[in-house]
Image (cartoon, rainbow, N blue to C red):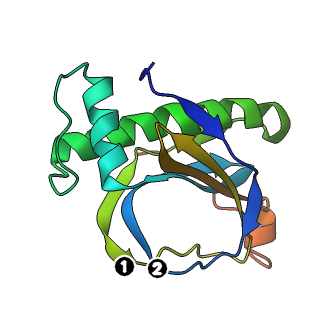
Amino acid sequence: MLNLTVTPGEAYREPPSSGPTDGVIALLGLVGQWAGTGIVQCDPSLAGRIYTHLLAMEDTPPPEAVSDDVLDAVAELANIIIGNVKNLLEEQTGPMGMSIPTVVFGHNFNTRSGGTESWTVVPFTCDGAKLVVKMCLRHVPQPGELRRGFAVPRCVTI
């Protein structure tokens, strides 16, 4: 779709809290009987090329020019990638909903999951640059398990 050469690397596990990072990160929440987060991460230069190829433009913006349009392009790519992974996972996990992406761009920042589960990370080389896809999911207990000692609330209609 983007007309870029993409080569997958070897998947690995990463602890819930990793070290500082730079670049563009798109995060999408997943919820159902399993819940968690999917991430697509790349450097600003690749984010600009994704934007250029997605919109079939001639000139790639310079890496320091990460505009709202560039962030939107990375968000759309994350929707495509994480959405396809979600669809495949649903065969095992049951139906899941997916949030709209949140995109972050910066230097020397940390991301951290609220849980203790490790991340599954699949690195890719995309047109000579690094693109990373991460996923962290955990099983969600049934409502009765979450509210020990309390009745499950009934819906109220007005």
Instruction: State the residue at coordinates (59%, 78%).
Output: 18
Residue 72 left/right relative to 118: left
User: Which quarter of the rendered picture does the N terminus lie within?
Assistant: top left
Q: Are the two marked residues, 1 and 2, in contact with CB atoms closer than 8 angstroms?
A: yes
Residue 54 vertical placement versus 73 (above, below):
above
Dot 1, crowdedness within 10 Å: few (<14), some or many (≥20)? few
Q: Residue at x 67, y 55 (%)?
A: 35
What is the x, y in percent for residue 10? Answer: 76, 50
Return the residue nearer the eye: 35 or 60. Answer: 60
Nearer-the-camera pick, 61 or 156: 61
Q: Can residue 117 be seen in this view?
A: yes
In the picture shown, does residue 30 fall above or below 95? Answer: below
- Identify whether 158 is placed above or below 7: below
Could you say which is closer to the camera, residue 81 or residue 128?
128
Q: What residue is at 59 percent from the left and 76 percent from the top?
A: 114
Count of numbered circles in the view = 2
Q: What element carries label 1?
A: strand
22 relative to 9 in the view: left or right:
left
Which circle's residue, 1 or 2, is located before the other in the chain?
2
Nearer to us in this view, 50 or 4: 4
Mark 2 highlights which residue?
20
Please give the label number shown on residue 133. none
Residue type indicated by callout 2: Pro
**Which quadrant, please, contains the C terminus?**
top left
User: Which quarter of the picture shows residue 24?
Assistant: bottom left
Image x and y of residue 134, in percent: 61, 55
Q: Label 1 belongs to which residue?
A: 108
